[in-house]
């Protein structure tokens, strides 16, 4: 039987989502829990996508197959009992056997948070401590160039080769409240580091004469500064 789980996690103490040998990961922790529950059957978790080291998730999704007869309530309770408190399974449901958590994604929603005020040690793992003013008005003007279907190779991981760098961003929401800038990206999918690179570029153009349109059209990753750090990024939701 195939199950779909919705789960949240604090990525601070993990080496990213994907299972790695000799490293603590989100996938590894959940798979270890499922393998305890299965009674010997090896269970592999297939997620909507990977997140990097230090990135958080509010509603990550993944599917797995389990032949053991168990109620949804007991299965969810058992997973949460075996995993660390950094991870929590919020929902679990039965899906058709041809359902795929990665290939059937229609939309992903990511939010990035930036502190433009004084350094806050209590939020250092959850909000990027930029701690300098940003030109919010310019950022709001510049994000419009990222909306639509584009070749996003300027914002891709320069070491990762893809057959296509074309993705679609449906909407970008910019909210600035109490010195915290939140930028939410809604798209059909994102390249590795794409969201963090876009945020890094927006920070770069905020206090310079550069423009996002020029960077996007150049298809050249070297045209802007540093990638935004991982701790400010949240996978907010996945839609099927």
Image (cartoon, rainbow, N blue to C red):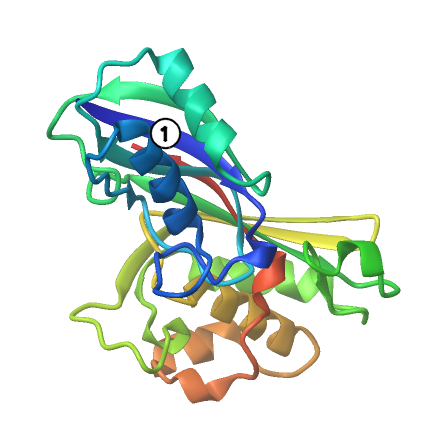
Quadrant housing residue 71: top left
Q: Residue furthest right?
A: 118
Question: Residue 222 or 92: which is nearer the viewer?
Answer: 92
Q: Position of residue 146 (x, y in %)?
A: 44, 61
Residue 170 visible in the current orientation = no
Q: Is residue 76 above or below residue 65?
A: above
Q: Position of residue 197 (x, y in %)?
A: 49, 71
In the picture, measured across the screen, residue 118 lies left or right of residue 198, that is: right
Quadrant housing residue 109: top left
Q: Is residue 216 above or below residue 90?
A: below
SS of the residue under disc 1: strand
Q: Residue at x 56, y 64 (%)?
A: 230
Residue assigned mark 1? 5
Q: Residue at x 29, y 14 (%)?
A: 70
Quadrant housing residue 131: bottom right
In the picture, measured across the screen, residue 178 lies left or right of residue 46, that is: right
Q: Quadrant of the C terminus?
A: top left
In the picture, measured across the screen, residue 159 lies left or right of residue 52, that is: left
Q: Residue furthest front?
A: 40
Q: How many marks?
A: 1
């Amino acid at each position: 039987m195939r199950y779909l789980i919705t789960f949240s996690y604090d990525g601070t103490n993990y080496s990213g989502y994907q299972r790695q040998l000799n490293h603590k990961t989100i996938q590894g922790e959940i798979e270890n829990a499922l393998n305890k529950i299965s009674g010997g059957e090896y269970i592999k978790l297939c997620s909507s996508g990977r997140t990097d080291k230090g990135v958080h998730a509010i509603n990550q999704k993944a599917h797995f197959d389990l032949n053991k007869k168990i109620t949804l309530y007991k299965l969810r309770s058992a997973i949460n009992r075996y995993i660390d408190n950094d991870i929590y399974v919020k929902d679990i449901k039965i899906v058709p056997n041809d359902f795929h958590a990665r290939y059937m994604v229609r939309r992903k929603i990511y939010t990035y948070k930036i502190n433009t005020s004084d350094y806050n040690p209590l939020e250092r793992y959850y909000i990027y401590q930029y701690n300098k003013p940003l030109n919010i008005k310019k950022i709001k003007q510049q994000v419009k160039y990222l909306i639509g279907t584009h070749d996003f190779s300027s914002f891709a991981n320069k070491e990762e080769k893809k057959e296509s760098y074309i993705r679609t961003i449906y909407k970008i929401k910019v909210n600035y409240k109490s010195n915290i800038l939140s930028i939410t990206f809604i798209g059909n999918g994102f390249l590795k580091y794409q969201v963090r690179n876009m945020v890094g570029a927006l920070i770069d153009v905020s206090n310079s004469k550069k423009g996002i349109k020029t960077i996007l059209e150049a298809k050249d990753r070297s045209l802007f500064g540093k990638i935004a750090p991982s701790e400010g990024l949240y996978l907010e939701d996945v839609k099927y």
